[in-house]
Image (tube, grey):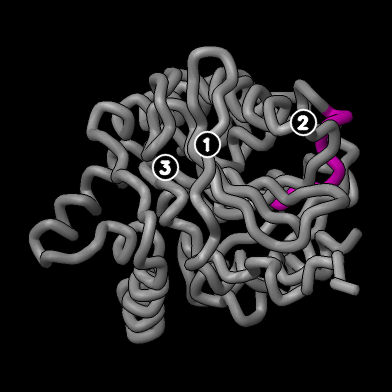
Amino acid sequence: MGNTDTPKEFVVTSYAKAPANAITAGRVTYAYRELGPKGGIPVVFLVHLAATMDNWDPRIIDPIAKNRHVITFDQPGVGASTGRVPDSIEAMAGDAYTFIQALGFDKIDVFSFSLGGMIAQDLALKHPDLVRKLVLTGTGPRGGNDIDKVVGTTYWDILRATLTRSDPKEFLFFNRNTTGKPAAKAFIKRLQERTVDRDKPISTRAFQTQLKAIQKFGRSAPSDLSTLTHPTLIANGDNDRMVPSVLSEDLHRRIKESQLIIYPDSGHGGIFQYHAKFAPAAVEFLAP
């Protein structure tokens, strides 16, 4: 008699090997990847400004995917997804909701970073019953002080990176000191571990539209975050130049019973610099 059970080793738990998928909802075909054991509540990842699915650190995704169904995707107009990037965070949250509904999920956990964290807040505020747990990293609230300055910081660091032939994330995400520089190089190297089915880079127009949406978010009236009752984990470095670290503390104060982790001597990419500490903390927080 043949064994009809699927052997556990067939479950893909390495992000570098996660299959590329697509699903169409409305007029948009969403590119996505999934890994980890299916069943239960999935963890949906919302990525940062200018990023595609290739920008997730495997040292954070892989530990979570060991025991959880993980889904990453490209928003409309980004990477391999069709459509156009909307000019507001609220509309991006609507697109994320459309994608999640198309996959047939009525309950998810959300792991978000930077721009993704802004989208995650709007998603949880508008669809509170959809979200079980919320991870907000390197991000801040609507109307947060100096969020609108991210445009100038981003363009300045892109220029600095161009002049030194570096990846802009080395400047935007990490301190330029003896701790930050090696952490930046190691992070960029990890992003290259996937060698097949790599994503398409974001277009300049899509990137500029995302920047406008962030600027608008920063200049908008604050959301009432006291209505968020979801278990929430907030994390950042202590020297975030993109989304100031004080905004993580602001989120912590405004979201009831949230947990806050601030990593020392690190910037916007603090969770990537401290992946060996942060990944287990995220796994524990996201436990069913």
Q: Residues within 10 Å of mark 2 (few under 14, many from 20)?
A: few
Which comes sooner in the sequence, label 3 or label 2?
A: 3
Residue under pointer 3: 49
Q: Nearer the viewer, residue 97 or 142?
A: 97
For residue 70, above or below residue 29? below
Tell me the SS state at disc 3.
loop
Tell me the SS state at disc 1.
strand
Residue positioned 76% across, 21% down in the render: 126
The quarter of the picture where the C terminus appears is bottom right
The disc labelled 2 sits on which kind of residue?
Answer: Gly
Q: Which residues are magenta?
A: 128-135
Q: Nearer the viewer, residue 9 or 198?
A: 9
Please, what is the dominant secondary structure of the magenta stretch? strand
Q: Which numbered tag is attached to residue 22?
A: 1
Residue positioned 45% across, 30% down in the render: 214
Image x and y of residue 133, in percent: 82, 48
Q: Nearer the viewer, residue 19 or 239?
A: 19
